[in-house]
Amino acid sequence: MVILSVKPLFMILVVPLALFLAVVLLSPPSPYFQSSVPSNSSLKPSIWTVRRIIGWRPCKWWQLGDLTVAELKSNGYIRVDCYGGLNQMRRDLCDGVGIARLLNATLVLPKFEVAAYWNESSGFADVFDVEYFIHQMNGFIKVVKELPSEFASKEPFQVDCSKRKGQFDYVESVLPSLLEHRYISITPAMSQRRDRYPQNAKAALCQACYNALRLTRSLEKKASELLEAIPKPFLSLHLRFEPDMVAYSQCQYSGLSSASIKTIEAAQGDRKPWTGELARIWRKRGKCPLTPNETAFILQALSIPTSTNIYLAAGDGLMEIEGLTSVYTNVVTKSSLLTGEDFTSMHGNTKAALDYHVSINSDSYVATYFGNMDKMVAAMRAFKGLYKTLFLSRRAFADFTSQGLRGRDLMQALQKAHRDDFVIGRGSALPYCFCEVKL
């Protein structure tokens, strides 16, 4: 009779099991879990076939104009100084218009700051139709292209608005500077409390955002050319997995190429990724950008056919893009469709404007993040009555994968979570300019 030692047998069985569990529980989600992916045909119909019960329409009160007639006497001139990418600057401009109306000021054409980080040198007039903007704002707020001679050669007095949040903050803290200097510049705080604005200031803000900003004729022509070149019907996908985005998120990823890892490390600087329990908590909060591979997996979970024509609305430097294009093979970009000299000479703002134009006119729009562009595109699509708009849930993906869901089970859980969001129109519009309606 052969007698087996209990301790060695225990070690043989337990140690590999412990190692396996450690890999599953401690590693960040990796593509795609060595589980077979069910075909689209074995899942429910596409997310776009789901009937929504709640939609958004622009509120009539700010479009009618009866609350928005500006007073005759102006308290002075305000210039809005805008920073960052195009859609961040657009957000600052909209907020600045509301603030100028709140303070009964005349608006000077905004200043788009040149930013080397965004590879940017184009100003407001290079992107938007100035005459159209002035005309559309008539009755909401007065806009001038040129200052009176007494201010024309002067730089405005800069007012720090970093901590201003609502109507009384601006009236009490900014209005005195406006009355004293008569010409000031502001950069609105990111945490605006627009709900505290009076109706006429809200109306001016909404009008500026959704009725007054039109691309220049040359840029609109190029954007229309791009839109025409995209195979129809198509989905516009705003995918964010650039080195700076990943570095800023402080998230860990497994399965990335050595080239991607090296690029991320170069962008990190002193901002090192979270580790251990903090990394897991951070990921479960939905703070980690979806990889192209994860994005493709979720799109399949939503029964979006792999033959779908996809326009990739993204800037330069996307990493691991093969994770998407190996599954969804009909992917096009602006650089693959527009190769003329006028396109190659474009800078960040004008290129972003092309993505914006295509995205608000696409058959469907999917975003992997909830940034400034996504918010603007979703709101404008609601303004135009286009409801095939969806934000992929990083939180749901992280939550389900941390529970150990894989393959078909993961797909079904993701599908339900996104269907629930889509039905109620979550994230589709800005509440202070849009009114909820039952569909």
Image: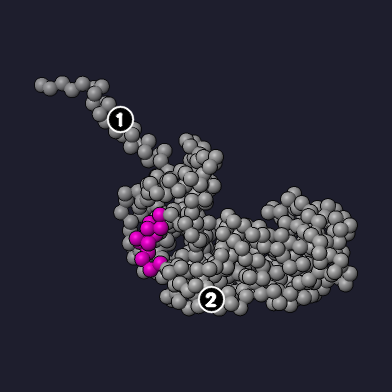
x and y percentages locating residue 133 in the rendered image: 70, 74
Q: What element carries label 1?
A: helix
Q: Which segment did they paint magenta?
A: 320-331
Question: Which amino acid, by three-letter code, is at mark 1?
Answer: Val
Q: Which mark is residue 222?
A: 2
Mark 2 vs mark 1: which is more N-terminal?
Answer: 1
Q: Residue furthest left?
A: 1
Identify residue type, mark 2. Lys
Q: In which quarter of the image is the C terminus?
A: bottom right
Callout in the foreground (2, 1): 2
Q: Residue at x 61, y 78 (%)?
A: 217
Q: Can residue 216 be seen in this view?
A: yes
Q: In this view, does 365 lie to the left or right of 436?
A: left
Is 297 on the left-hand or right-hand side of 82?
left
How far apart, in angstroms, are the residues tagged by discs 2 and 1?
A: 62 Å
The residue positioned 61% from the left and 63% from the top of the image is: 121
How many badges with numbers are in the image?
2
Does residue 136 appear left or right of residue 345 in this picture?
A: right
SS under mark 2 = helix
Give the labeled residue for mark 1. Answer: 15
Label of residue 290 in the image: none
Asked whether residue 296 is drawn in magenta, I would say: no
Q: Residue at x 49, y 72 (%)?
A: 341
Residue 310 lies in what quarter of the image? Answer: bottom left
Could you say which quadrant of the image residue 219 lies in?
bottom right
